[in-house]
Image: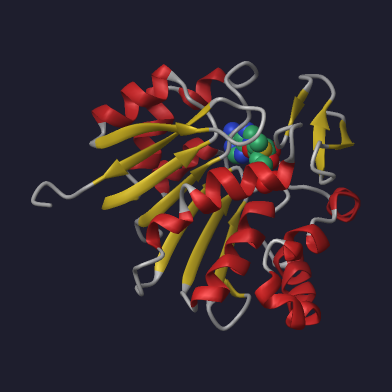
Amino acid sequence: MKRTILETADGSKTIHLDEWDETYHSVHGAIQEAIHVFIKQGLETFTESNELLRILEIGYGTGLNCFLTLLSTEINGKSVEYLGIEKFPVTAPEFEAVDYFDQAMDNFPELSHRKDEFRAYYDKMFLADWNQWHQITPLFKLKKESIDFFDLVHSTDSLVDLVYFDAFGSRVQPELWEEDLLKIVSDRMKPTSVFTTYAAKGTVKRGLTKFGFIVKKKPGPPGKREMMVGYRLKQDE
Ligand SMILES: C[S@@+](CC[C@H](N)C(=O)[O-])C[C@H]1O[C@@H](n2cnc3c(N)ncnc32)[C@H](O)[C@@H]1O
């Protein structure tokens, strides 16, 4: 499918699928959306915990959410294992064209004196071979897995604490927002875990509730009224 590059309202770029008229990120601001939905409403739930954090991303795409996670957890000194699922990897020209590096760094001024080091990590994440674990920084491990989301049913990786559900919208891929995939994903999550997504869809709320989550609507990022976070707690908590 033909993919072209667009600029979003916060100046950061995104990829547009011409045939579907669908973008990888919000046109109201790719970086703003990623920080709001995945970092603030997802990752920051775990700020108080010192334990290794396992994250699963549904739709690795450009790696933007992954890089923002690396930056954010570096500040807290938190160790992360990050599994990103992506069937149609972004190409090198696309990765260069979106180039999130400077704008991502601007959101973490505490790290500005280590810019060269993080540029190397940013590139290393993109260049890392698929389907194997890589130590990107002393704290951050990454595996990019090039499989269909539904193939996660065969996964033998450890269960995760946090899911970033960043699939294309239900207008173009409705099958990704139904119970079957939600069951597969929630089976990859620990008994105490968090699921965050930019969407606020009834099917997702019903599915997650069925699989043991308490689902809360949250204010969305700029340009979007609502988003959703699911919290699963062990029975005895
Ligand atoms: C909304 S984009 C993800 C954006 C990404 N998180 C980022 O920050 O760039 C959705 C991603 O899901 C991938 N995708 C779509 N259908 C898929 C499937 N069935 N299995 C695996 N990946 C799929 C697309 O190629 C695309 O990269």
Give the vertical position of 79 relative to 233 (above or below).
below
Report the residue at 74% width, 33% height from top: 28
The reply to whether residue 223 is in sight is yes
Report the residue at 62% width, 68% height from top: 71
Give percent across and percent down for residue 181: 43, 31
Give percent across and percent down for residue 214: 27, 35
Location of the N terminus by quadrant is: top right
Give the vertical position of 227 relative to 163 (above or below).
above
Q: Along the horizontal axis of the image, is 13 left or right of 193?
A: right
Closer to the camera, 169 or 183? 169
The reply to whether residue 190 is in sight is no
Q: Which corner quadrant of the image does residue 143 belong to?
A: bottom right
Give percent across and percent down for residue 93: 91, 51
Q: Along the horizontal axis of the image, is 148 left or right of 234?
A: right
Give percent across and percent down for residue 124: 74, 71
Furthest-left residue in view? 236
Q: Along the horizontal axis of the image, is 236 left or right of 21?
A: left
Closer to the camera, 166 or 146? 166
